[in-house]
């Protein structure tokens, strides 16, 4: 069965084909009135994997895609139980960490080499960085017409503390040829079709990004072994770029003499038009470019949308902001639909490519309904748009302002 990742589409297609939802047959499926979608899997919270917070939102169970509601991103460092999951294939099985190998090969490697986990841990210096990882499709639900793929709302983002060795140190130890332009990763997850010769995803970054201080081959997240769902026992972690370049269950890095051409590097996967197009428009494959640094964005993590507060109460709001390879220089919020903006306090990042925490205290003039809009500006003066930015066929890079609703009673 071909599954659509679109939540409603998935359920409707399943129903039309009288196929199953959650492994059980939909009895009376043929009676469902046209235009009505069944509640389906969203009602069965126990389908979330073990170790995940019960209020995460299941977008798809095959492959597993789970998002974090913004209020659950309130921690300064994202804990494992609240981290979104974006899998493209099936989880690897029977991992034996003692036998795990990382192969370094490719046209532009001087000598092919194989490392064990122990080699990595003992032969190189280790580093710890907080790194922001946002799915390129975060915010996809905002685009009209709807594009295919998981309809992420605002929570496909995390910032955890990763420990490992620098990819640069490992690549330099094997030798990089002069003609190297890109690296590509391969992981041990398997293709949904069950075809073991196919990768579910194999992406990469240009050498310049690969050789940055913060690009890690990591074995620990928040001071512990990386959870299985997030790439145990080894993960490539590249902060500030679409999280799809941070390969989980990492088994191979290839040093390429051309742009890596692995699975999900072509077509409209993680690529956007080089010129603006009208919503729903088409363009030739040659007119797309690969997404690199992610755009400036922010999230309100406190209060939760829908909060009801008492009159005269001043309110302390908080959240995080990030800007790909850049720093966030200013954070503002509006309670009057963007007519006026108030400056927030923005902390410096813990290290380059870590998200930044912001806070602000506000007073509401009288009782009633308010929306709070949050807008970050990056170090080059580029701000988040208040409206949905450029439509693109893959539904990437929606960095419009996060909004929450509150009532003063
Ligand atoms: N091997 C492998 N790595 C992968 C993926 C995958 O499916 N397989 N998904 C990528 C995508 S698209 C994203 S957004 C991030 C999600 O990371 P997380 O699930 O740890 O939050 O992992 C990336 N790395
Ligand atoms: Mo992603």
Image (spheres, helix red, strand yellow):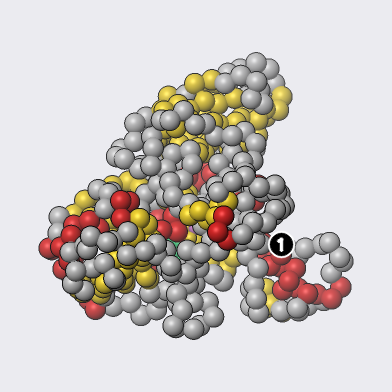
**What percent of the width, then of the height, locates residue 334?**
59, 25
Pick the residue in front: 338 or 259: 259
Pick the residue in front: 216 or 36: 216
In the image: residue 247, left or right of residue 97: right
What residue is rendered at 62% in x and 51% in y? 392
Pick the residue in front: 210 or 101: 210
- Label 1 CA crowd tier, 10 Å (few <14, some 14–19, many 20+): some
Residue at the left extreme, as displayed: 123
In the image: residue 161, left or right of residue 109: right
Quadrant of the image containing the C terminus: top right
**What percent of the width, then of the height, locates residue 104?**
25, 70
In the image: residue 250, left or right of residue 114: right
Pick the residue in front: 55 or 94: 94
The answer to whether one can see residue 318 in this image is: no
What residue is rendered at 49% in x and 41% in y? 295
The answer to whether one can see residue 321 in this image is: yes
**What percent of the width, then of the height, locates residue 191?**
49, 77
Q: Quarter-wise, where is residue 262 in the image?
A: bottom left
What residue is rendered at 40% in x and 46% in y? 240
Quadrant of the image containing the N terminus: bottom right
Which quadrant of the picture is home to ligand 1?
A: bottom left
In the image: residue 285, left or right of residue 135: right
Position above or below: 300 against 194:
above
Position above or below: 223 against 177:
above
Label 1, secondary structure: give it: helix
What residue is rendered at 30% in x and 55% in y? 207
Position above or below: 371 against 173:
above
Disc 1 marks which residue? 8
**What percent of the width, then of the height, locates residue 214?**
28, 48
């Amino acid at each position: 069965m071909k599954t659509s990742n679109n939540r409603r589409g998935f359920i409707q297609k399943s129903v039309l084909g009288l196929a199953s939802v959650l492994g059980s047959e939909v009895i009376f499926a043929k009676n469902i009135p046209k235009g009505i979608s069944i509640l389906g899997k969203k009602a069965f919270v126990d389908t979330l994997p073990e170790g995940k917070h019960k209020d995460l939102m299941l977008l798809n169970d095959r492959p597993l895609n789970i998002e974090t509601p913004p209020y659950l991103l309130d921690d300064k460092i994202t804990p494992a139980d609240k981290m979104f999951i974006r899998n493209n294939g099936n989880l690897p099985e029977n991992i034996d960490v003692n036998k795990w190998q990382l192969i370094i090969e490719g046209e532009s490697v001087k000598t092919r080499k194989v490392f064990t986990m122990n080699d990595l841990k003992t032969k190189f210096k280790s580093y710890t960085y907080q790194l922001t990882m946002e799915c390129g499709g975060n915010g996809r639900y905002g685009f009209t017409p709807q594009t295919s793929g998981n309809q992420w709302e605002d929570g496909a983002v995390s910032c955890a503390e990763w420990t490992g060795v620098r990819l640069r140190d490992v690549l330099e130890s094997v030798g990089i040829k002069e003609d190297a332009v890109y690296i590509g990763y391969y992981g041990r997850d398997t293709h949904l079709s069950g075809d073991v010769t196919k990768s579910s995803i194999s992406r990469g970054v240009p050498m310049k990004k690969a050789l940055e201080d913060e690009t890690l081959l990591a074995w620990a997240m928040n001071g512990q072994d990386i959870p299985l769902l997030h790439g145990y026992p080894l993960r490539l972690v590249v902060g500030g770029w679409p999280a799809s370049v941070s390969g989980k269950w990492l088994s191979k890095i290839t040093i390429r003499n051309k742009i890596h051409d692995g699975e999900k590097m072509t077509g409209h996967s993680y690529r956007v038009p080089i010129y603006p197009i009208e919503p729903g428009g088409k363009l030739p494959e040659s007119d797309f470019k690969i997404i690199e640094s992610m755009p400036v964005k922010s999230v309100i993590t406190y209060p939760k949308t829908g909060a009801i507060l008492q009159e005269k109460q001043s309110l302390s709001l908080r959240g995080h902001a990030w800007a790909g390879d850049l720093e966030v220089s200013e954070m503002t919020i509006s309670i009057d639909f963007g007519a006026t903006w108030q400056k927030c306090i923005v902390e410096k990042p813990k290290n380059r490519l870590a998200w930044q925490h912001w806070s602000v205290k506000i007073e509401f003039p009288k009782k009633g309904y308010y929306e709070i809009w949050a807008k970050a500006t990056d170090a080059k003066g580029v701000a988040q748009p208040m409206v949905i930015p450029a439509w693109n066929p893959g539904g990437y890079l929606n960095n419009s302002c996060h909004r929450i609703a509150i009532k003063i009673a």
